[in-house]
Amino acid sequence: MTAALLDVLICPRCRGRLAAAAPALRCDACAREYPVRDGIPRFVAEVTDPIARRTRASFGYEWTHFTDWQPSGAVNFHDYFTGLDLAGLAGARVLDGGCGMGRHARQVAQHAGHVVAVDFSDAVETARQNVAECPNVDCVQADLFHLPLAPSTFDFVYSMGVVHHLADTDLAVRCLVQRLKPGGRLRVYVYWRHSGWKGALLRVVSAARRITTRLPHGVLHALSFVLSVALWLLVVLPLRACTALGIDASSAPLFVYTRYPFQVLYNDQFDRFSAPLEKRYSREEASALLARAGLEQITVTPRFGWLVDGIKPAGTAD
C-alpha cells in the first residue's frame, strides 16, 4: 500500500480520513478499523443479498482460476482502450472499477501516474500478483456501491464488463462518477443487445444460463472446457480459415476469438455461463446509462459490445 493510496482513501461509512494503524487502517472520525492483508486494504463485509453473494463467489472463482493476463494482454488492451488518449494519462490518477485479474490495471499503469484497482471478490488476490511489478498500482478490496475513495479524485475511471452484472447498474455508474474530477472521463463496457438470428442465439444462451449459473463452479469449469473445445474446432478454426482465404467473416459470432488463443475463449465461456445476473443494452440504452449519471459528451463505440464514454461537467458537485 503506497502513500498515494492513503491520500485518497476514506472511510466508506462516514467519509472520514483513514490513517495507518498496523495491521489496519483507522478512521479519524468514527474510529472504525479496516484490515490490511498482503498490502491490500479490505472494505468488504459479509454479503447478505443472495444474488450479490453468488456474483462475488462467481467472479472470485473465475479470476483465481483464470489468472494469466498474458494470452489476452496487448490485444485485449487495444480492443477495450481504443480511441483513448493514453499520452494524456501521464501523471493522471486512474480508477479501475472491478479489476478482475488486474490485466487492464497492469496495462494502464504504463501510461498513468497512479492506478487504484478495486474488486469486491477474491480476484483482488490475483490482481495483486499480476500488478506486482507495477509500483504505481494499488489494489483495494471493496464494492462499487461503497467505494472507500474520496469524491472528485480521479482523472479517468473505467469499468470493463462489470456494471451489467450488478442489480442496480445505475447506482454503480453514479458511484463511479462521484469519484471523477470535473472534466474527468468515465469509460464502461457493457454487453450489447442483438435482434434477428443473433438475438435468437442469445436467447438460447440465456435459457441455458438459468441452469449453468446454479451449477457448482468446478462442474461448470469442466463443462466450459468441453464447450470451448467444440467451439474452437467447429467455429473459430473455420473462421480463421475464412480470414486466411480472404473471406470476410467478421460479422460471425465468436469471430473475435480468431485473434486470441484458446485460453481466452475458455475463460469467456465460463464467464458467460457463470455470472448470476447479465444485462444487455441497445446503443441508445447504453448512452442513457451515462446520461442519467450526469455525464456529457457521451460516445458509444461498438467493440464486441459497447464502449461508452462520458465527461463529467465542470463545476459538478458530489
Image: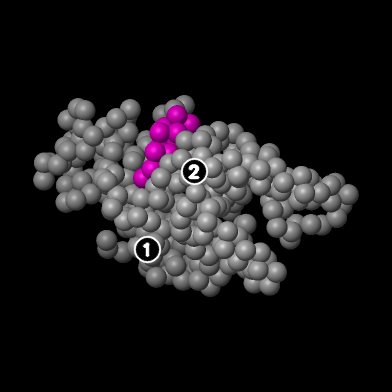
Is residue 127 in the magenta section? yes
Identified by mark 1, the residue type is Asp
- Determine the secondary structure under disc 1: loop
Reading the image, the residue beneath label 1 is 168
Residue 313: image location, x then y, percent? 38, 64
Mark count: 2
- The quarter of the image holding the N terminus is top left
> Which of the pair 276/45 is nearer the observer?
276
Q: What stretch of residues is rendered in magenta?
A: 117-130
- Determine the secondary structure under disc 2: helix
Is residue 25 in the magenta section? no
Nearest to N terminus: mark 1 or mark 2: 1
Residue 160: image location, x then y, percent? 49, 51
Residue 171: image location, x then y, percent? 35, 63
Residue 153 sits above or below residue 91 on the image: below
Q: Is residue 70 visible?
A: yes
Task: From the viewer's perspective, tell me whether residue 288 is left or right of residue 198.
Answer: left
Reading the image, the residue beneath label 2 is 217
Where, by quadrant of the figure, is residue 99 drawn? top left
